[in-house]
Amino acid sequence: METKIIEGLLWYFVFVSSTVCHEASHAWSALHLGDKTAGRSGQISLNPWPHIRREPVGMVVAPLLSWFTLGWLLGWASAPFDLKWARQFPHRAALMASAGPLANLVIALLAAVAIRAGIHWNFFTVPDAPTMAHLVTATANSSGALAMLSQLLSIYFSLNLFLCVLNFIPVPPLDGSSLPLLVLPEKIGRLYFDAMRSGVLQIIGLLVAFTCIAFFFPKVFFFAANVLLPGSPLH
């Protein structure tokens, strides 16, 4: 039970910090593209509190409950934006939407660099059966702190890869649904933007997204892990 609590706290820490970076990236990009809405509400911050205050259920209640009942974190957050601005400038809205999952991709890449450095310097080793929480483990002569770090980096890589892939699925209400706005003419883009705001489409989109992610994320994860880990036993 103690191990489950510690691992849950690590997953939760990574979830909060990664989600904060995701939403702060939305807010920062929106500000520089002409929308100050998220900036005025304090979302351009790596301080978790403004994000938790906006979505306490998605940032605190749901993740902790889902971990101890389902064994997996389920949570969400959001950054406010001006719908009139997004409709008027659909190309800018698409760039703003892309900023969040791109932030997760950057975090995953930084974790990957740290993992490879740890392997190179013999701090980490690849276990016989790597998992999302244990892509690497500390070598026998490493300290307890490095054991914790190896698990933390594994979770940062795995969870941020998941968040990036999930949010780039092109269905509403996920960020990927805005990608067509990058190439659509503005007039058609506005019609598309209005359609994506439909509550029915968003519910259908979530069902499609979770069905798709359950099918293809394991393949993405195995591919990424095999690239990351030398001589990986993952297949």
Image: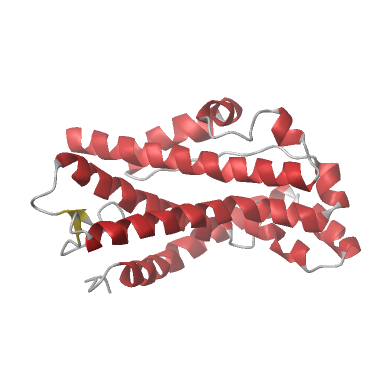
Confirm whether residue 188 shows in the render: yes
Where residue 182 appears, as percent x and y from the top left, is 76, 64
In terms of image quadrants, where is residue 61?
top left
Q: Residue at x 65, y 38 (%)?
A: 79
Tell me, yes or no, if residue 174 can be seen here: no
Q: Quadrant of residue 45?
A: top right
Q: Position of residue 170 (x, y in %)?
A: 64, 63
Counting labels gives 0
Q: Quadrant of the N terminus?
A: top left
Q: Is residue 39 above or below residue 98?
A: above
Q: Is residue 121 left or right of residue 163?
A: left
Q: If the image is split into quadrants, where does the C terminus sit?
A: bottom left
Measured as percent of width and height from the top left, residue 36 is found at 77, 36
Left-right relation of 42 to 90: left
**For the point 34% across and 55% down, which residue is it?**
114
Identify the residue at horizontal 84%, vertical 45% (top origin). Answer: 85
Residue at the extreme left of the image, as rendered: 140
- Where is residue 145 drawn, in percent x and y? 20, 40
Q: Determine the residue positioned at 82% across, 53% down.
A: 194
Q: Residue furthest right?
A: 187
Colour scheme of the picture: secondary structure
Left or right for 207, reference 2: right
Q: Choose between 50 and 67: the one closer to the eye.
A: 50
| Residue 171 position by quadrant | bottom right
Q: Nearer the viewer, residue 126 or 180?
A: 126
Q: Which residue is more in the foreground, 217 or 156? A: 156
